[in-house]
Amino acid sequence: MRVSIKKGFSFGLTSGIITTLGLMVGLHATTNSALFVIGGILVIAIADAMSDALGIHISEEFENHHSTKQIWESTITTFLTKFIFSLTFIIPVLLLPLSTAIIVSIVYGLTLITIFSYYMAKEQKVNTYKIIFEHLIIAIIVIIVTHYIGDLIASFI
């Protein structure tokens, strides 16, 4: 797999999982509404995927050592990966009670991060446990913080 595609995939996957989980957990804590959570996921899947793709595009252009083809590969891969992985989080919300769907989504998201972190660490020949732990800690912090922000906002409603 070409580096430009790996870059777009890794960024889109990680950002899609962490951003979507943070939004879901925060909206659940604030509203306890499946409709709001689904709406949030759709917004993330479209607007944030486009925003991240543009961010990668500009970053790659700024580095000034990538071909136009490489830049567009990273851009498109970032968008598609984030868009698709973000949308997968709608499935549990549609099929399960919201509180259960949130738990299932957290387990699903953390599992995906674990698998991808393992793959990445193996490919780079670095300590897999350290990489997995580091990435999971960051994701868990996002989940915890967004939950408490949602609780705080709910207390004012």
Image (spheres, rainbow, N blue to C red):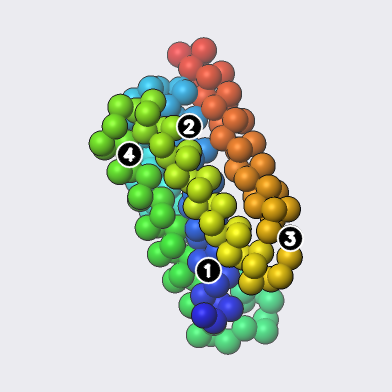
Residue 47 visible from this viewpoint: no
Say left or right for 52 vs 28.
Answer: right
Which disc number belongs to residue 25? 2
CA distance separating discs 4 and 1 = 26 Å
CA distance separating discs 1 and 3 = 23 Å
Label 3 Cα crowd, 10 Å radius (few <14 / some 14-19 / many 20+): few
- The residue at which mark 4 appears reads as 92
Determine the residue positioned at 65% across, 52% down.
Answer: 132
SS assignment at label 3: loop
Determine the residue positioned at 44% across, 71% down.
Answer: 76
Which disc number belongs to residue 127? 3
Does residue 27 lie above or below 42 as drawn?
above
The residue lying toward the viewer, choosing from 72 and 123, is 123
Residue type, numbered disc 3:
Asn
Residue type, numbered disc 1:
Gly
First reached walking from the N terminus: tag 3 or tag 4: 4
Say left or right for 130 vs 115.
Answer: right
Determine the residue positioned at 67% across, 81% down.
Answer: 64
CA distance separating discs 3 and 4 = 33 Å
The mark lying in front, picked from 3 and 4, is 3
* Figure label count: 4
The residue lying toward the viewer, choosing from 34 and 50, is 34
CA distance separating discs 1 and 2 = 25 Å
SS assignment at label 4: helix
Does residue 39 lie above or below 112 as drawn?
above
